[in-house]
Image (cartoon, coloured by chain):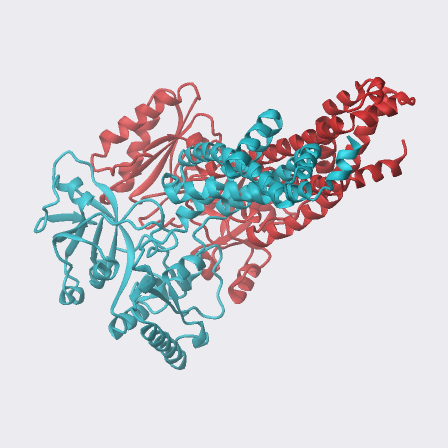
Chain colours: A red, B cyan
Amino acid sequence: MRMPPMIATLGRHRLTCWLLVLQVAATCAVVCNAAFLVVQRVQRVNEPSGLQEAGLSVMALSLAKLHDDQLAQYLADIDALRRISGVRAAALVDDVPYLGAESSGTTCGNLDAVHRMLAARADVPGCAEPVLYSGGPQVVRALGLALVAGRDFRDDEYVQGKAGYQMGNAPAVIISESLARRLYPGRSAVGQMIYFGNGLSKGQGKQVVGVVKHLGRGILRKPVDYDQAVLVPSEPADASVLFAVHSSARDQSRVLAAAEALLDKRHPDRLQDPDFGRPYARIRHAYFQRDTTMIGLLIASALGLLFVTALGIGGLASFWVQQRRRTIGIRRAIGATRGDVLRYFQAENFLIVTAGVVLGVLLAVGLNLVLMRHYELPRLPLWYLPVGALVLWGLGQLAVLSPALRAARVPPVVATRSV
Amino acid sequence: MFGYYFDLAWRSLKRTPILTGLMVLAIGLGIGASMTMLTVLHVMDADPLPGRSAHLFRPYLDPVPLRGNWGLGPDPSINLTWPDAMALLHARKGRYQAAMAGTSLVVTPAQDGVRPFTADGRTTTRDFFAMFGLQFIEGAAWSAAQDDDAAAVVVVARSFAQRLFGTAQVVGQVVSMGGHEFRVIGVVEDWAPRPMFYVDASAKRYAGADAFFMPLSTGVSLNLGTNGNQSGWADYNNLRSPTVTWLQFWVELDTPAAVADYRRFLHDYAASQKAAGRFQRPASTARLYGLMGWLGVQHIVPGDVSMQAGLALVFFGVCLLNVVALLLAKYLRRSGEVSVRRALGARRRNIFVQFSIESALIGLLGGAVGLAVAELGLWSVRQRPDDYAHLARMDLPMLATALVASVIASVVAGVLPAWRAASMTPAMQLKSQ
């Protein structure tokens, strides 16, 4: 097939061609960026919590005021919760991942880093800003954390916390693997000292006794800080605490109802709270709701754009086929086969889409730069561009197929008729 | 003439139902998606106090040291410190001025068997009510003396009074909040400007409202705390400290001269604090924001929403390109008809008008489809859990905008094709037939 005559033909419809090229280019740019955004959001939504989420229920108890023996009351609550049939483990915690709030603290892996951090008052290597969780006995089992090194807390390591989110002077901590890698690069974290909170200014460390595969934050902000967590064996004693209750997924709704009734009875002065007892899955779903909405919207608009563009390509191609019936007939009459006609329209479409894709790739990179400026997005990986181009080529061929087949069916005898 | 063109357009559209359907669908989808997102933006960007907002101003001071590590927290200079707020308050440079902060308190109902609950309210100073135009049903604001003496008094909103006592006539009653007793001295109509412009950045601006109001001094002396951001760089937990920011401040200035005066006053205040060694930053960092300007710098529209709006507009743009191409093909194909009309005496202008009316008709149909799509889109927005979602409804101006935008867009899209069709030479076309 020879290109020059084809280009000359397209030149007769210069304006229409340019419109199509522009449309393909805009679609290519938006679809590449939308796909990139979707992948990013999907990664965020799938960010691990580290918890064994199936079967985990979380009760949020808020009291009007603290009682003198508050912690003892909570511990008695935990005892009662463990006696509900089907409960495998129950523990007092101050927070769980993706609840939308967190307490974090600057944390360093060695004294040198502490001194550098205090002098610079800025980020220094060897320090991080992990989320700090405190939890009572059975916390690792109740949350279903997966230890990858070291051990669980011993019973004598748990200390009593105080109101005002004070963690007490616990001797040991468990940290997430991602934090371990950041604080102790190239070394085993177990047995190392870790400094945070009051320990920073006093130079007093705690010992890392265990490392868990994952432990998510309460809020996701910067990807470098995702999955960075410290778990302190301290029993929270504030007016608001959480009870993590683990059961089998089958027992969950029954256990949740029983736990709600139990805490309700034991705390008549509990505050009204629509989120009193929830399966953990619901906490997670609520936190990522915006992202899932955005994923849906992005996919819908990308598909919508592709659909509209396909309609445009198909619609114009049908017009051209109708317009050129006579010329097609003449070509058939002087020896062109059906395949020749079919391929002609396919090649024509390929030419237009290619021009659009070339422009679209440039637009996609430009759009990505704009998005990076306004929304703190990373750079678009270049491999998205050829994939986007392939999608549009495929779409163009698909859209032109039916009109092209119709063109191929034009009988040579048309040449002899007047239009 | 118009009726005739309209008739011609209708016949022409009916002749090519699939192509017409495609164009109407493209415009409808584009208009529907854009209108959905523009309505959401329109709701979020709305003027919270029409008529009053032009006179309300938010002073900004930056007492934050030059060196500091703020980690993940918000910018501490967004709020004011107690000494700065008190200095602005006592200078009385505006018609009204008030310092304020949000607070969440546990309310214990007097009846037995009713669980205590948490209510959000505001600790503020007495000008708050007059400046923002709250309507008293009963009673009045506290006095200046009560502001100074940290009196245990409270002004409640009607719905809060109803919830606690079952009636709005509650002046003189006592409410137990945050472990303290407060005497009700006034009841106001429920007041919830959207967005809630005067709250701290951590508050939900499109949901909820203040259930009660009490003197700021009372909140500080009883240490009720704030539910907003409280940032400090020394002496963190002392609310009266000059190194802890947590207060919002608004002032009413009625004339341009008063605004200019206040700007000068604010600059001089910052300069004096710098001279005294308290501020490390230059006095030029002190600013006076108008209400809408303040909302602008606060970026109250979430990134997701503006991104969705951008996406919707690009989508509309591509739909329009599509319509231009389809119209071009459609109009140019009617060269025969155009030539005959031209030969019979129609002028280029007539042809152009005829095709433009056809484009407008497509736009009108597309606008109708678009309205349906937008209603569907807004319905789905309202199902989201975001705080602004429940506000996403189309009002009459937006409805009219949708139809007009659709017609204008399709006429604009049709200009080029109509012009091309009108400028064909009739002789050539007739000959080739």
Pick the residue in front: B240 or B89.
Answer: B89
Pick the residue in front: B196 or B183.
Answer: B196
When the figure is inspected, residue A254 is found, relative to residue A45, above or below; the finding is above
- Residue at the limit of the structure toward the front, as seen here: B344
Q: Image point 38% across, 34% down: which residue? A: A91
A201 vs B99, left or right, is right
Pick the residue in front: B249 or A63.
Answer: B249
Q: Image point 25% across, 73% down: which residue? A: B92
Can residue B117 be seen in the rendering of this structure? yes
Residue B328 locus on image (x, y percent): 67, 38
Residue B95 locus on image (x, y percent): 25, 69
- Residue at the limit of the structure toward the right, as seen here: A335
Occupied quadrant, residue B295 = bottom left
Occupied quadrant, residue B324 = top right
Q: How many marks?
A: 0
- Residue at the limit of the structure toward the bottom, as seen here: B275
Can residue A190 be seen in the rendering of this structure? no
B255 vs A416, left or right, is left
Image quarter of the C terminus of chain B: top right
When the figure is inspected, residue B84 is found, relative to residue A291, above or below; the finding is below
Q: Image point 31% across, 27% down: which residue? A: A259
Residue B145 locus on image (x, y percent): 14, 67
Residue B208 locus on image (x, y percent): 30, 45
